[in-house]
Amino acid sequence: MSSRQQQSFPWEEASGPWSGLKAFLPTCGLVLLKPFDFFRRLKSAAGRPQARHLRLALVFALAMGYLRFFLDTLQVFWLQALPKDAFPLLAVRPVFSLSSMVLGSPVFLLRPVLLLAVMMGIVVLGVKLVLGFDKLLLPALLVVCYKSAADILYLVPFVGGSLAVLWSVVLLVAGLREMYSIGLLRSAIAGVLVPLMIFFFVVLAAGPALNGILLTFYPEAQPQWMAFNDLNAFVSMKTIVSSIGKYREDLGFYPAHLGVLEKYLGAGSLEEVARSGRSAGYGFGYARTDDDHFVLTAKPLEEGWSGRFTFFADQSAQIRLKGADGPPVSQVADMQQLMGSAPAAGGSR
């Protein structure tokens, strides 16, 4: 057997659509079961035309992406037909899992392409930051494409999504290790840790402005986004009430407005709550009636869409729902119970 044959794999040896179709599953099996061997073979083929390398990898990744897309779309129909009491795990849905709201997205059919592009961007940036800006981009792009072989695990009922995510991380780390000849630790930092930090930095920097973009692409994430807003508003209320109490302890009276609480809230929280008047779907209101009395409220900017609860607090330091006579809510666990019993949003606006 020639050296070229020894270092090849079925997908890159395919000469047409039919042979490519026959090579698809064997290549998936090789990537999933022998990732280090696969990426060593891929690296040894670096002398071949780069355009062909990348073109074949993109076709493979998009094929896997649309297979996952198809399986997710099926859930829109068959999950609704299954009894939730008999299958409690069905109540735990991933944020980006599809639902009946999915057709509200104008870019519904482009999701696999967009997800692949975003993943490529953040992994390439992680590689450049950790391994050096002199590193070639092609190896990282190939690894991102072929790690999508893990998406075939979505065929496993119920737990397939979790298995796919975990194994795709393993494939990403293994691929970067082999393609760049680095240790597993540096590979994990470049391919997983730094991209996650970049992602969360973008989310935090964009703040609530990101919500509109996210919900345009993923309208089915709206119930989870709304639940996050509810919990975030409750936590913010507790933080603000505590800060108001500390202010009064120091100065003997309640603040005239929230803008003077920077020492207690911190500049970031103050900017979000006091100056913008918004906190991820909620608007805050504060009024001091006299030195010993105040009223603090948090209301959804769009009730039933950005949030489901109206929070109220005063000098008693208790947080209540709806108003001064509403039921008190003291712990995050209480909020989680309320969120579980509250009706979820449905449909589009």
Image (spheres, rainbow, N blue to C red):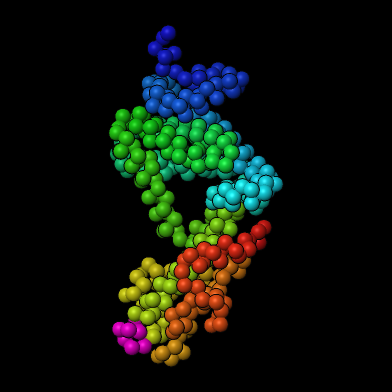
Q: Magenta segment, which residues? A: 247-253
Question: Quick one: quadrant of the C terminus?
Answer: bottom right
Q: Residue at x 65, y 59 (%)?
A: 346
Could you say which quadrant of the image residue 182 lies in? top left
Front residue of 280 and 308: 308
In this view, which residue lies farthest toward the bottom?
290
- Can I make out residue 341 in this image? yes
188, above or below 263, in the image: above
Q: Which of the two residues, 81 or 52, is positioned nearer the viewer here? A: 81
Q: Quadrant of the N terminus?
A: top left
Q: Position of residue 104 (x, y in %)?
A: 65, 52
Query: Farthest top residue?
Result: 1
Q: Residue 315 placed where, x, y %? A: 44, 84
The answer to whether any part of residue 259 appears in the image is no
- Seen in the picture, residue 79 relative to 248 is either above or below; the reply is above
Q: Main secondary structure of the magenta part?
A: helix
Residue 167 pos. (x, y %): 45, 36
